[in-house]
Amino acid sequence: MDFGCSDPGAWRDALSSYDKHMESLNNPKLAELDKLYRTELPRSLHSRTPTAHITKNELNKVMEWKLTRGKWRPRLLSFVSSLDETSVKTASQKAFAALPDLKEAVNALSTLKGVGPATASAVLAAFDPHIAPFMSDEAMVAALGSSKEYTLKQYLVFAEKLQNKAKELNSKGQVKEGDNGFFTASDIERALWSAAAGAKNVVDMPDGKGRTNLKENGQRKRRKS
């Protein structure tokens, strides 16, 4: 998926393929964690308003989801597992209350050991997908050209780009919040992840045809830029 694409239909196709590409990974644990993260967790968080917060167990699940979907770093999971319930509740309550100020929200969550901007973004995305997209490798590469700098400064640039892309697509599609086809910043992140996963599946085709096609597509994109 070319981040510069302004066709709502193309983005919708990528987003609608998310579940298919998730299943293609043949990772039942990830599929279960992803369902919890995308459906059950947001409901649980919002059920606690006006004092919304995340529990230690939920934070553990978010970390598991993040590491299983990306790069496995067990030390981060051990850090989060060692946190106490009160600290997690206090930090997340402060973070959710700070939104839409992403800088303040990320800083609040980052006081917890093992929680950096990427993990904080996963927590915030579950609570407010319009404002806070998850800082995934795939979306970072697509939007910024690199996934090496996981800093707050980089996340703020990344989030703004995905928010603006969502606004652009909603404007072109003439849809508003609540309408079918309305995009959030988190939808943009999932569409980019889905497109990257789909491209990887094509590259991994045993006949090698997919690799050639992708290379040709990449050359066409470079000529456009």
Image (cartoon, grey):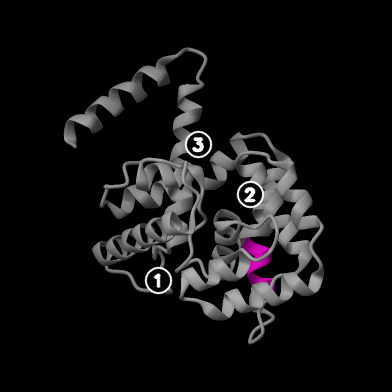
In this orientation, which residue lies closer to the viewer: 181 or 131?
131
Structural distance between the alpha carbons of marks 3 and 1: 27 Å
Q: What residue lies at 50% left-to-right and 19% top-to-bottom?
A: 205
Q: What label sits on residue 179 in the rendered view?
A: 1
Q: Amino acid at mark 1?
A: Asp
Q: Is residue 110 magenta?
A: no
Residue 87: name its quadrant: bottom right
Tell me the mark number nearer the camera, choosing from 3 and 1: 3
Which quarter of the picture shows residue 53? bottom right
Residues shaded magenta? 39-45
- Where 130 sits versus 118, above or below? below
Residues at marks 3 and 2, CA–CA distance in whole angstroms: 15 Å
Q: Which residue is mark 3?
A: 197
Quadrant occupied by the C terminus: top left
SS category of the residue bearing label 1: loop
Question: If the image is split into quadrants, where does the N terminus sit?
Answer: top left
Q: Hey, what amino acid is under mark 3? A: Ala
The disc at residue 66 is 2
